Amino acid sequence: MALTLRQDSHQLSLSGQGTLSPDGRYLFRGTLQPRQGMPPLLALLVTRPTANNAPGPTPWQLQGKWLPQEQK
């Protein structure tokens, strides 16, 4: 299954694409972009310097395996 993610708020913009396989493996890739409403200290956590110190979106990647909870 392929997914497209997009979330915008006054503090943060997140967008990306991902896949979820039948065996539960997932992989998501995208970008984070701070907004004007983001507190400065939080913006430092979201952004990272690039090779040319150009402002812009921060790439992110998340992968793993979905483990369903056991039935009780």
Image: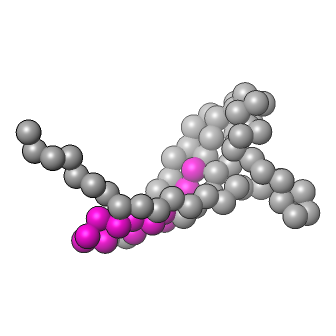
Pick the residue in front: 53 or 63.
63
In this picture, which residue range is highlighted in magenta? 14-28
User: Which residue is drawn at the image coordinates 62% and 34% (left, top)?
Assistant: 10
Q: Is residue 33 left or right of residue 54?
A: left
Q: Nearer the viewer, residue 20 or 17?
A: 20
- Please provide percent x and percent y for residue 17: 48, 65
Residue located at (25% from left, 71% from top): 22
Residue at the limit of the structure toward the left, as seen here:
72
Q: Residue at x 55, y 56 (%)?
A: 15
Query: Which image quarter holds the C terminus?
Result: top left
Which quarter of the figure has residue 21? bottom left
Residue 20 in the magenta stretch? The answer is yes
Q: Is residue 1 left or right of residue 8?
A: left
Residue 9 position in % (x across, y down): 57, 37
* Quarter of the figure with the N terminus: bottom left
Q: Is residue 23 magenta?
A: yes
**Residue 45's quadrant in the figure?**
top right
Query: What secondary structure prevails in the magenta region?
Result: strand
* Location of residue 23 in the rendering, given as x and y in whole percent from the top left corner: 26, 70
Total numbered labels placed on residues in the image: 0
For the point 46% across and 62% down, the residue is 63
Residue 58 appears in the picture as rendered: yes
Q: Is residue 64 left or right of residue 55?
A: left
Can residue 3 be seen here? no
Above or below: residue 12 compared with residue 48: above
